[in-house]
Structures are given as structure tokens and as C-alpha cells.
Image: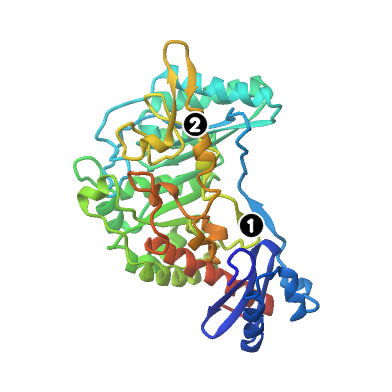
């Protein structure tokens, strides 16, 4: 089978002809499948050969194809106009699976680093003639835990951007451990926020305890409810573990009833960081997929949207890269290091030499970059493994998360051995047939 252009995807006795780059998705018979296989086996096969079987591919078989993501050329000068700040490595929680082991190091960003970073991206945006620039807060740690710098950076960015004729765009990823005063302050300045909540009280309190093994559920629940009441769009990020994987439908029902209209990002736990110490193993891929399918039906009447990073229901949007690592992302840590990956923020991380590519020189306030590493990152998702190219799901996972697929020697792990691959394939298969059901007016 020619994995670069045409795929035959099967599910429950039904067969779909799927050509992502051409925007083609249509159901075919067993006889048509055999004829297509015979064509594909020919060395000179191309998409146009399909017209021998389907002389008139109808418009209702075609998707309005788009491409998601950005292609960066090696020659393009690196001058980022967006940044993600890690204001601290400290945190109010001690989540069992935290990739950064947040809270174990009390390292905070200072005002000098925040200001120099913001000045840098605004200068770049203005010199490029752009109309807007972007500031994100993530961790590392809990970005609002270093509240003075969080406030300073957000306000300074807004004022400096507007002074330079730019539209400031801001995002926040938070654990939701916020006071009423903090919630009010944030709600006055943002339109959207991502809050981490793993489920009902017993799940959240077990997986995401506070310092000293305290309970976090009530505070986070109140934060989400407050943001919604104030008109903010909320994305709930929920990590699925071995314990919670069998309760995915129940978790989504809880979110749907209490926070209708929100978006839920479900993600299986990855064994890294503190998860290595607490033995947080990847949950069953089969159970994750099963729970996801069941939860979708529950979420729909409440207008709750669900997604997972390795697949997409928007089949028309073929992805160029899994995330911004290949741009590369411009992420500045509390110590002024520059990394392309949220999960690799310290110099002693096993993958630091691949993802950390610069630093802020404290003596003159300028950023110093390793352009060889930048070049390597820009090529990191271009050459997808040949085995992946034979998979119909690679147009949406694009080889999946690079940090999760590299070993300490910088070698990519073998495709299909990663349980995320099974999830990526099964969810993509599900979305393909949902598209067919929709075209035929059938209920999936």
C-alpha cells in the first residue's frame, strides 16, 4: 500500500478510501477495495489512477482541505514574536505524575528576565511588520505561584505591545489553585484559560494533592466555575492514569453536568518526572480509546468538546507538525534558559542537549542562541519514520510528541511500540468513519 497518498481504512466490516492530501474520504465495497489494491501495487501508481475505478469523484466525497502548522525553512532568521514564560519551578501542588517534579526547586523568574524577554519579542514583531504578538504562561511550576512576576509580565506585555501598535494575545495554563482576588484579576485581562482538573473529588485529590498531601478539588472547582461565570472560555486539562482510565465516561459526565459548554483535553499519563518515582505507568490504550468513545456520546448533548493531542476530528486540517518544537518554540525558564519543549526546562534533563538551545545573557540582557540546534529542531519533524508513513494516522499525529519519542541518545523509538500510536490510530479511524456516517446522514 502506498502510504504517502492513498489508504484503505477498515472498521467493523466497512471500508473507507482515504486520501488526506486530496481531501478524499468515501466508503467503498470489497470488490472496489480489491481493484484499488491491484492499482496501488503498480510502481507508477498515483491518485489520478483512481479515476479508472471512480470516473467521477463526487464533490460530497471531498473535504475542504486545510493545512495546520507552520513550515520553517533553514534559511529563515530566528526572531520569535511569541514566547511562553515559566515564571517559576515552584508549585502549590505535588501531582503524582508531574513531568517537572514542580515544587521541589524554589526557583523563581525575576523581573529582569521577564522584561528582557518581552522586549525581545515585541521588537521582533515590530521589525517584521506584524500586527500582533503572543505571551503564554506555563510550567515548569505553577505560573501564578510567582504572583508578582506573573502580574508584572502580563501587564508590562499588554502596555508595551499596545504602545508599539501591536495587539497583545495572552494565554494561561494554571492548576487552578487561585484565590478569589486572583481569579478576578485574571478574568479582567484574559478571555480564555486552561485549568487542570483530573475528575471528581476523589480522583483530583489523589492525583493532584497540595503540599503536605492536602486536598485541591474544592479550590480548583471554584476557580473553573468562577471563570465560566465571568464569561471566560475554559479548557479543562485532565490527565488519565491507570486508576482513572476506566472512569473516563464518568469523568466527562461530571464535567458536562457541572461545566457545560467547556472543552476537555484528555491526555494519558506519561511515565516521566515525578511519575517515575510514584510509578505512574501509561494506562491501557484499549481502555482509553473505549472510554473516549463512550464519553463523546455523553459530552455531545452538553455541548462539551473533547480532544486528545495525537488525533484530530478535523480531518480536513492535515498537520505539518505535532507541536511548535520544530519552529522552534521560544520558551524561557525562570533561570533564563531557552527551550523548545515544555517538558525539558532544566540543563540536567536527559534531553536538554536536544531541546535547550539558548539563554539570556545577564550581563547585557541579550539572548544567545545555538543556531546549529535550532537547525536540528527545524528538521526534527520533517523526516517522519518510514513505518509511520504507512499509517493513515500520521497526517494528524505527525510522528507524535518528539520528547516522548526520543531516548537519551537522541534516537527515535520504534513506531507502534509506543501505546500512544494505538490511541492515535484508533481515534483517527473513529473520526474517518464518523465523517462517513455524517455524509450518509447516519448516526455514528
Residue 139 vertical position relative to residue 225 in the rendered view, above or below: above
Task: Give me the residue at 26% from left, 50% from top.
Answer: 275
- Asked if disc 2 and disc 1 are in contact, CB closer than 8 Å, the reply is no
Q: Residue at label 1?
A: 317
Task: Give me the residue at 75% from left, 70% from top.
Answer: 48
On the image, the x and y values in percent for residue 85 come to 45, 31
Q: Is residue 175 left or right of residue 70?
A: left
On the image, the x and y values in percent for residue 23 come to 69, 65
Q: Residue at label 2?
A: 372
Closest to the observer: 353 or 424?
Answer: 353
Task: Give me the residue at 32% from left, 44% from top.
Answer: 408
Task: Give me the residue at 63% from left, 69% from top.
Answer: 6
Closest to the observer: 80 or 187?
Answer: 80
Secondary structure at badge 2 equals helix
Q: In this view, does 396 lie to the left or right of 38?
A: left
Question: Where, by quadrant of the figure, is residue 138 drawn?
Answer: top left
Q: Label 2 neighbourhood size at 10 Å, few (<14), some (14-19), many (20+)?
A: few
Residue 401 appears anywhere in the view:
yes
Q: Is residue 106 left or right of residue 112?
A: left
Image quadrant containing the C terminus: bottom right
Closest to the observer: 109 or 347?
Answer: 347
On the image, the x and y values in percent for residue 137 come to 46, 35
On the image, the x and y values in percent for residue 94 come to 26, 43
Q: Label 1 neighbourhood size at 10 Å, few (<14), some (14-19), many (20+)?
A: many
Closest to the observer: 262 or 356?
Answer: 356
Secondary structure at badge 1 equals strand
Amino acid at each position: 500500500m502506498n502510504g504517502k497518498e492513498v489508504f484503505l481504512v477498515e472498521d467493523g466490516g466497512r471500508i473507507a478510501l482515504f486520501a488526506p492530501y486530496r481531501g478524499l474520504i468515501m466508503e467503498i465495497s470489497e470488490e472496489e477495495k480489491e481493484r484499488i489494491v491491484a492499482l496501488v501495487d503498480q510502481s507508477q501508481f498515483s491518485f489520478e489512477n483512481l479515476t479508472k475505478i471512480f470516473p467521477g469523484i463526487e464533490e460530497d466525497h471531498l473535504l475542504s482541505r486545510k493545512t495546520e502548522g507552520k513550515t520553517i525553512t533553514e534559511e529563515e532568521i530566528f526572531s520569535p514574536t511569541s514566547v511562553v514564560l515559566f515564571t517559576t519551578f515552584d508549585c502549590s501542588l505535588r501531582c503524582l505524575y508531574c513531568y517537572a517534579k514542580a515544587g521541589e526547586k524554589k526557583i523563581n523568574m525575576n523581573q529582569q528576565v521577564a522584561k528582557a524577554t518581552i522586549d525581545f519579542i515585541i521588537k521582533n514583531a515590530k521589525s517584521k511588520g506584524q500586527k500582533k504578538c503572543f505571551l503564554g504562561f506555563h510550567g515548569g511550576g505553577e505560573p501564578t505561584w510567582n504572583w508578582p512576576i506573573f502580574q508584572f509580565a502580563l501587564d508590562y506585555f499588554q502596555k508595551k505591545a499596545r504602545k508599539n501598535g501591536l495587539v497583545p494575545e495572552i494565554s494561561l495554563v494554571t492548576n487552578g489553585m487561585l484565590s478569589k482576588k486572583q481569579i478576578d484579576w485574571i478574568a479582567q485581562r484574559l478571555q480564555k484559560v486552561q485549568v487542570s482538573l483530573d475528575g471528581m473529588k476523589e480522583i483530583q485529590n489523589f492525583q493532584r494533592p497540595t503540599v503536605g498531601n492536602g486536598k485541591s478539588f474544592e479550590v480548583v472547582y471554584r476557580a473553573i466555575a468562577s471563570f465560566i461565570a465571568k464569561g471566560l472560555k475554559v479548557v479543562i486539562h485532565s490527565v488519565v492514569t491507570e486508576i482513572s482510565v476506566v472512569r473516563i465516561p464518568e469523568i466527562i459526565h461530571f464535567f458536562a453536568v457541572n461545566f457545560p459548554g467547556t472543552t476537555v483535553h484528555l491526555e494519558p499519563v506519561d511515565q516521566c518526572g515525578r511519575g517515575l518515582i510514584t510509578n505512574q505507568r501509561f494506562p491501557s490504550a484499549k481502555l482509553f480509546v473505549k472510554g473516549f468513545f463512550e464519553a463523546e456520546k455523553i459530552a455531545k448533548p452538553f455541548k462539551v468538546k473533547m480532544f486528545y493531542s495525537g488525533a484530530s476530528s478535523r480531518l480536513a486540517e492535515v498537520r505539518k507538525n505535532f507541536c511548535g518544537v520544530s519552529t522552534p518554540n521560544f520558551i524561557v525558564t525562570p533561570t533564563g534558559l531557552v527551550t523548545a519543549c515544555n517538558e525539558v526546562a532544566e540543563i540536567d534533563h536527559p534531553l536538554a542537549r536536544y531541546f535547550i538551545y539558548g539563554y539570556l545573557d545577564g550581563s547585557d540582557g541579550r539572548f544567545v542562541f545555538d543556531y546549529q540546534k535550532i537547525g536540528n529542531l527545524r528538521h526534527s519533524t520533517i523526516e517522519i519514520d518510514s513505518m509511520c508513513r504507512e499509517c493513515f494516522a500520521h497526517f494528524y499525529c505527525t510522528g507524535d510528541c518528539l520528547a516522548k519519542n526520543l531516548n537519551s541518545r537522541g534516537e527515535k523509538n520504534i513506531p507502534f511500540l509506543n501505546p500512544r500510536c494505538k490511541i492515535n490510530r484508533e481515534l483517527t479511524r473513529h473520526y474517518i468513519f464518523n465523517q462517513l456516517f455524517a455524509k450518509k446522514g447516519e448516526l455514528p
